[in-house]
Image: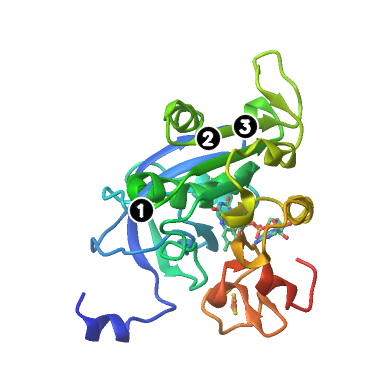
Amino acid sequence: MCQCCAEKKDIYLPQLATVADISQMNATEKYLRLSMDDGMFDFLPGQFVEVSVAGIGEAPITISSSPTQTNGFELVVRKIGNVSGAIHNLKQGSKLGIRGPLGSGIYPVEEAKGKNVVFICGGIGMVPQRSFINYVLDNRGDYGEVAILQGTKSYDLRLFTSEIEAWSKRGDVQMLETLDEGDPRWKGDVGVVTKLISKVETDLKTVKILVCGPPIMYKFVLMALADHNVPPENIFLNLERKMKCGVGKCGRCNIGPVYVCKDGPVFTAAQMKELPAEF
Ligand SMILES: Cc1cc2nc3c(=O)[nH]c(=O)nc-3n(C[C@H](O)[C@H](O)[C@H](O)COP(=O)(O)OP(=O)(O)OC[C@H]3O[C@@H](n4cnc5c(N)ncnc54)[C@H](O)[C@@H]3O)c2cc1C
Ligand code: FES
């Protein structure tokens, strides 16, 4: 698309995409690989799309693949209601609508170059983080030491297990994983993800830390990182709010003066301290 057409693009008009691949990951999550019918889609790690299913509605979903991947882009959708339920019913070759990529507050792709990077993921929080993780690994020479911490409630809810296994076999990544609940099939750590923070071999005071998970996890991760004297400017958290327009127009997602859709969804802990509400 030329610059002129891109500028005139209707921000409310979904573009058609095709489901290239779809599969069940566990009891609640489905993986989808999509390709845009016009072949146009450039995004950065941390951005999301509004996914629409004809006759049902729209839902914001984060892009889970890295922009370095060229055969379409990937989403992981948890079945929770109308739209996500309709997305779960799609088949290979089904059509859906995509608005985006959306969000300007993204992962610190440039700022983190030359620095050590630590990812802290809780449950489905791995989904957005995976975009930046794979970006960093595909541009490995641009970044310093890398640690990935994953906490999941139970064995059967683990996501991207073969990718996690591959990361743990690399000599240039420290992969740490824990389950909240023990399981006879699980030989690793048991406990919440914060338990892993003290095992990170990199000096936390100087790293860029990317965090995504449920709100309760943020509270305890921030407390643990404060104990390690990590400056709030170095902590990046992915926020989730109910959204409608996704482009800063309807006021559904705002926290005080900040629109999570337009200004986020990724914010530093320093930015969050300035927000008027609990997140
Ligand atoms: C920026 C952003 C990125 C997201 N990325 C993903 C993703 O990668 N994968 C994924 O599975 N989900 C993601 N979500 C959540 C997803 O958008 C909601 O689950 C979806 O909109 C639910 O729509 P529905 O029509 O299926 O459910 P509905 O029928 O609308 O709602 C079902 C229930 O879920 C609650 N609910 C709906 N939306 C939200 C929300 N945003 N936060 C909290 N509760 C909600 C409703 O109150 C209701 O109780 C993201 C949300 C945001 C804001
Ligand atoms: S969703 Fe409409 S302003 Fe953010």
For mark 1, what is the residue? 142
Q: Spatial distance from mark 1 to mark 2, Cα to Cα?
A: 17 Å
Secondary structure category for the residue under label 1 = helix
Q: Quadrant of the C terminus?
A: bottom right
In this view of the protein, which residue sits in the foreground, 45 or 247?
45
Which residue does the numbered mark 3 point to in the structure image? Answer: 177
Q: Position of residue 207 (x, y in %)?
A: 56, 54
Q: CA distance from mark 3 to mark 2?
A: 10 Å
Type of residue at label 1?
A: Asp
Amino acid on which the number 2 mark rests in the picture: Gln
Q: Is residue 137 above or below residue 23?
A: below
For label 3, the crowd category at 10 Å Cα-Cα, with few meaning under 14, some 14 to 19 and many 20 or more, is many
Q: Earlier in the sequence, mark 3 or mark 1?
A: 1
How packed mark 2 is, by other alpha carbons closer than 10 Å (few <14, some 14-19, many 20 or more), is some
Left or right of 92 in this view: 123: right
Q: Which residue sits at x=60%, y=33%?
A: 176
Residue 185 location, x and y as percent? 65, 15
